[in-house]
């Protein structure tokens, strides 16, 4: 379903769907890609001894046969087929050559070499890629997919580029399984900063979109890059020590190899306030790279005004949050109308809420082991659901006691799914309530989507 | 002052103090190290063209002379002198050889080659270190210090080790200026996991202390590693996708190259609860690597009991927080006696607090733009200080609505210093109040220490 929806909005890029080397999986991938302008199917099977023996329980010959069949089957749906040797990092290179040769003949156009468990060092990945790209020549594109278990995903990917890889699989903020994948922002900015080494190796990525994209992904996933994360961390362009500050004042390049502006982070940007008008707000929104239609712009502006009444200075990150909340909002199945909380260190914290659902307003109260607990419990009581809180986080969006609080919760309303909810408010308690209700709405939306899909499938 | 206090407690390791290549700085470093069992002075000067021209405004010859004098002066206080070429990564290698030769003759025993701006790729750092270590031979130890601006600090350090470096400067959780320094945990675990490559290159680090140390540093600094941080991130040993989970169940090594136990993270550990006695608690504390005297143990146990009354399951991370709070507590100059808060979405949030200072209890109330704002404002009102909130963060220590909330604030009570405060409570509001008062106490302690130092200095 997610991939189907991606196909509806993406025009310029190729949409790729991943599938095990199994006909049903590939068929499902092909169905999801039906509406894509440019579609690719990416199928994979493990090629390391340990994976073949313990996970697949298959002989190498069977693995090759399965891979070839998968690629041929995928070719029925699209000419653009990518094949991956899972755990290639720990596979025998002679076997890799054998299987790659066969899948090329079956029609695979991109060959992906993943270091699935993040085991390899940069020079090892480099020499694997060198040998394979000499073997494959121009019969296919070599791709890499590096995991970060030892903290080496970025440099491993770079060494692969230097040795012939021409596709790099990476993610914004380095998100991914376990310690994540290679971080897109680190690879892109290294290629740019060290063009003396990488020469004509370029990406089509507009680097000024790196910071805004990182912020958006952090907001949606609730996974915040640590302050010392390279490129996109809060401190990546901050200079704390006196010696460094002194150097920076004398000459920027003494302590900086990139400019904050290059990743779309404008340190000298104008701060909006109470008296900023619609025009200044619109200009700011555009300078931050957002495109809003008139209705959304009006909505965002009125939220900005409410905030500006309470808060002296509105920073770029505040604006980003206001707009992100706008564009990532999901339907309000339940809606918070009113909230009161009371707490005392010698008494019992309680919360009283009025919540609207299908035009009906219900008010109730609950006690808790703390104010936040009480808020979540009264929402459960009113909605009739009972969520298990998996994660709770509050961060100040910018500086000052009057900063916006951004609350992210992860809640499991059933045994299978945990959903993320966000709340934004100058008041932490209000933001917590919004986040929890947001998670509940997101859960209900997901459930109704799943039900619809099942109905459609059943009717075929 | 910090270094003096480190000298008092550290016995087995060398305590090293950093100083610019200036006599006053070196003298101060020597004074701070007076009480150390094993002391080292580390002096540095920049050697890159851009730093010499724009920051130092000195000719290369003068730089050498300054370096030699600094090393000779440092030798008056200790035989163990380290010398750094700041921005070595962008320095000319012929000039590096020239200056290193001179400082070796002046008595430097460790030569540090920092990539100060995080500019170099692994193979470049490797070849710099190779050339320098062939030049220096056994006249001194070669050290490296890599910054993480492009996300390459760990692999850069590893390539330096492979090429002759025998000291690596790194930090827990990769903390440091801008995007930070090489992460200790990544380097140590790579050396261990890839002993086939690194052979007899070993550290004396007990890897089982990695996770506890990372937690402690995260708590003290308030800088949390992102969930996908290699080795110490929350998800580093989590397997989310179905395919990976399936593989893990069949054979752990299919998707893991290290075991969580190796870094001191015990995934199958016993969870304590309401009915756990003193004995079980003591065993748990010890298994987590803490050594507490009887008084601290009793204090920690009674806090555990209060928590266990409110919370069903007490996880290892809860226990770590209880004990960390204990051992990092600073004197209670101001102490929270009572707190009441009230908030309503249509009304005005307010907080009422009773705070004790020098045996006097003061009660007052304040309104705010949110509950947290109201709490901070009433503390300001009672104490007479006025803090500027630089950062505010809340995290759930473990899972569940009844999880402990850990609040970290960064507050500037004057223009020069921003201090960190922590609060731990099942109630987010209570934890916020504790954190802010903690920051205030820490600020006052620091100020009185600074005043004492000034008095001592003046009297000499």
Image (cartoon, coloured by chain):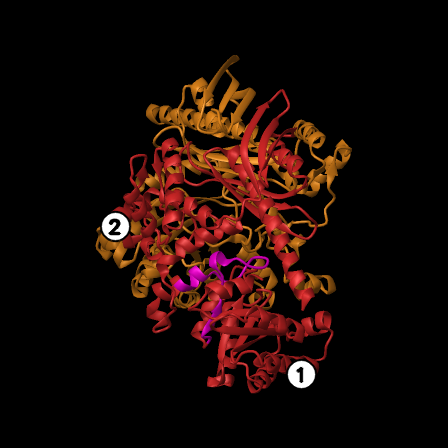
Chain colours: A red, B orange
Residue sitting nearer the eye, B150 or B399:
B399
Left or right position of B447 against A113? left
Vertical relation: A296 (above or below) A151: above
For the point 74% across and 65% down, which residue is it? B250
Residue sitting nearer the eye, B297 or A456:
A456
Q: Which x, y percent locates residue A17?
A: 56, 69
Left or right position of A270 against A372? left
Residue B162 visible within the image: no
Which residue is at the far bottom?
A: A105
Q: Quarter-wise, where is residue B120 in the image?
A: bottom left
Tell me where the magenta segment starts and ends, as one range: A165-188
* Residue of label 2: B55
Sort mark 1 into few (<14), some (14-19) or many (20+) by Cα contacts within 10 Å.
Answer: few
Q: Which mark is residue A65?
A: 1
> On what subunit does the disc labeled 1 rest?
A
B148 drawn magenta: no
Q: Which mark is residue B37?
A: none
Residue sitting nearer the eye, B24 or A26:
A26
For the point 66% across and 76% down, which residue is it? A23
Front disc: 2 or 1? 1
> On what subunit does the disc labeled 2 rest?
B
Q: Which x, y percent locates residue B371?
A: 50, 28
């Amino acid at each position: 379903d997610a991939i189907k929806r991606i196909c509806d909005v993406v025009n310029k890029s190729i949409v790729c769907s991943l599938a095990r080397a199994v006909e049903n999986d590939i068929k499902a991938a092909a169905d999801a890609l039906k509406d894509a302008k440019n579609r690719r199917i990416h199928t994979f099977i493990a090629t390391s001894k340990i994976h073949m023996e313990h996970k697949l329980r298959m002989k190498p010959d069977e693995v090759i046969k399965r891979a070839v069949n998968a690629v041929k089957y995928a070719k029925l749906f699209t000419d653009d087929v990518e094949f991956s040797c899972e755990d290639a990092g720990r596979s025998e290179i002679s076997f890799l050559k054998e299987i790659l040769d066969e899948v090329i003949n079956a029609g695979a156009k991109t060959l992906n070499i993943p270091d699935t468990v993040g085991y390899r060092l940069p020079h090892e990945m480099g020499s694997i890629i060198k040998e394979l790209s000499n073997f494959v020549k121009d019969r296919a594109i070599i791709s890499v997919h590096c995991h970060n278990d030892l903290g080496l995903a970025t440099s491993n990917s770079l060494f692969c580029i230097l040795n012939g890889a021409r596709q790099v699989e990476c993610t914004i903020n380095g998100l991914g399984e376990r310690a994540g994948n290679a971080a897109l922002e680190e690879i892109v900015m290294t290629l740019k900063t060290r063009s003396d080494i990488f020469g004509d190796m370029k990406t089509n990525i507009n680097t000024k979109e790196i910071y805004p994209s990182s912020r958006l992904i952090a907001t949606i996933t609730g996974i915040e890059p640590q302050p010392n994360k390279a490129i996109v961390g809060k401190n990546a362009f901050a200079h704390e020590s006196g010696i460094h500050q002194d150097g920076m004042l004398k000459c920027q390049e003494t302590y900086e190899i990139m400019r904050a502006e290059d990743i779309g982070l404008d340190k000298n940007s104008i701060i909006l306030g109470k008296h900023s008008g619609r025009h200044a707000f619109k200009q700011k929104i555009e300078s931050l790279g957002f495109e809003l239609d008139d209705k959304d712009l009006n909505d965002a502006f009125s939220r900005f005004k409410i905030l500006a009444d309470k808060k002296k200075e509105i920073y770029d990150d505040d604006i980003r949050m206001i707009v992100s909340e706008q564009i990532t909002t999901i339907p309000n199945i339940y809606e918070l109308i009113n909230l009161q909380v009371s707490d005392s260190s010698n008494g019992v914290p309680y919360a009283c809420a009025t919540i609207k659902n299908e035009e009906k307003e219900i008010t109730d109260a609950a006690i808790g082991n703390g104010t936040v607990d009480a808020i979540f419990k009264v929402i459960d009581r009113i909605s009739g659901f009972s969520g298990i809180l998996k994660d709770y986080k509050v961060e100040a969006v910018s500086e000052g006691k009057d900063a916006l609080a951004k609350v992210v919760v992860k809640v499991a309303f059933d045994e299978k799914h945990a959903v993320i909810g966000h709340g934004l408010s100058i008041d932490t308690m209000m933001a917590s309530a919004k986040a929890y209700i947001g998670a509940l709405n997101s859960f209900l939306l997901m459930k109704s989507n799943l039900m619809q899909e099942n109905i459609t499938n059943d009717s075929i």
